[in-house]
Image (spheres, rainbow, N blue to C red):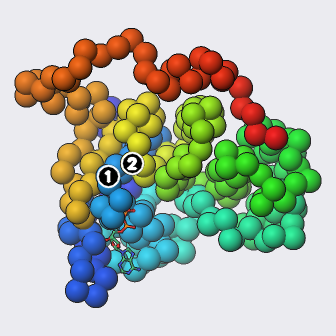
Amino acid sequence: MEKRKIIEVKDLVKQYGDFTAVKGISFDVYENEIFGLLGPNGAGKSTTLEIIETLREKTSGKVFVDGIDLDKDPGAIKKVIGVQLQSSGYYPGLNLTELIILFCGLYNEEADPKELLKLFNLEDKAKAKFKELSGGQKQRFSIATTLINKPKIIFLDEPTTGLDPQARRNLWDLIQQVRAQGTTVVITTHYMDEAEFLCDRCAIVDSGRIIALESPDTLIDQLVAGGFERKKEVKKANLEDVFIHMTGKALRES
Ligand code: ADP
């Protein structure tokens, strides 16, 4: 069966003054996949994401989200997407329950704060303020809030940067759960292990251009088929496995 394209980006260009940050990129995201934009810092990932999210003006090109033309109805796009706020977007005086109630009011949606917090393993933080949370908890809460307007697609910009290995793996599980419930996930990351674990397909972005777009498996197979060999024999575990084995999988963040 033909997969449905939920995002279509065609010849997207973004200039900041004389500098062209995004140099005519095209890609599609299919419904219900986890799609990754990978690349080094400055590659143009956030710019691309923010244009699709209607938060930044493009210079040229076309973007369709769930069939909606960005040039014609950005407001309609906002209704079908979930976007993470910067931490400054969370009113400092409100606790997590109050923030969820506030977002429900803004989106004109109903959600049970207790349920939502439980789903994201934050039930005992219901009365805490955002700034009192650990890094992993902040990320989990911010992903929870992207779901309040029942979006078809959520956008996660480097969701695990700065987290410890346990919190990262916990967040990966959570992102998979969100997808299992039918949501399409678009993620940017510069962690290749994260992309390999999570993404169905990923676009590698370098200096404003897409230089590859495949599943992680295919990308690796292509490299190997080209004669690539790792210098060192691959061990059956890595240092992160050692760390997780010694310090446990449980989250310790209180
Ligand atoms: P990435 O998310 O891949 O790290 P960005 O999209 O943030 O990359 O940035 C791409 C390039 O555009 C970088 O060189 C960055 O310095 C530049 N850039 C980003 N935002 C602006 C802006 N508002 N004004 C000027 N240049 C910008």
Left or right position of 162 against 88: left
Q: Residue at x 45, y 68 (%)?
A: 50
Task: Determine if the C-beta at disc 2 is less than 8 A from ligand 1.
Answer: yes
Where residue 39 is drawn, which disc sits there?
Answer: 1
Residue annotated with mark 2 = 190
Q: Distance between the residues labelled 2 and 1?
A: 6 Å
Q: Which residue is drawn at 87% across and 70% down?
A: 93
Q: Position of residue 48 (x, y in %)?
A: 36, 65
- Indicate the amino acid at tag 1: Gly
Task: Tell me, yes or no, if residue 208 can be seen here.
Answer: yes
- Can you say whether 207 is above or below 19 in the image? above
Task: Tell me, yes or no, if residue 105 can be seen here.
Answer: no
Q: Where is residue 121 in the image (x, y as percent from the top left)?
A: 77, 37
- Can you say whether 7 is above or below 165 in the image? below
Task: Determine if the C-beta at disc 1 is less than 8 A from ligand 1.
Answer: yes
Q: Quadrant of residue 199?
A: top left
Badge 2 local density, few (<14 within 10 Å), some, or many (20+)? some
- Dot 2 or dot 1, earlier in sequence: 1
Left or right position of 97 against 60: right
- The mark tally for this picture is 2
Q: Position of residue 235 (x, y in %)?
A: 35, 14
- Can you say whether 199 is above or below 53 in the image? above
Which quarter of the rendered picture does the C terminus lie within? top right
Which residue is situated farthest in the left direction here? 227
Q: Residue at x 59, y 23 (%)?
A: 244
Q: Which residue is drawn at 20% across and 46% down?
A: 212
Which residue is situated farthest in the top direction here? 236
Q: In which quarter of the image is residue 205?
A: bottom left
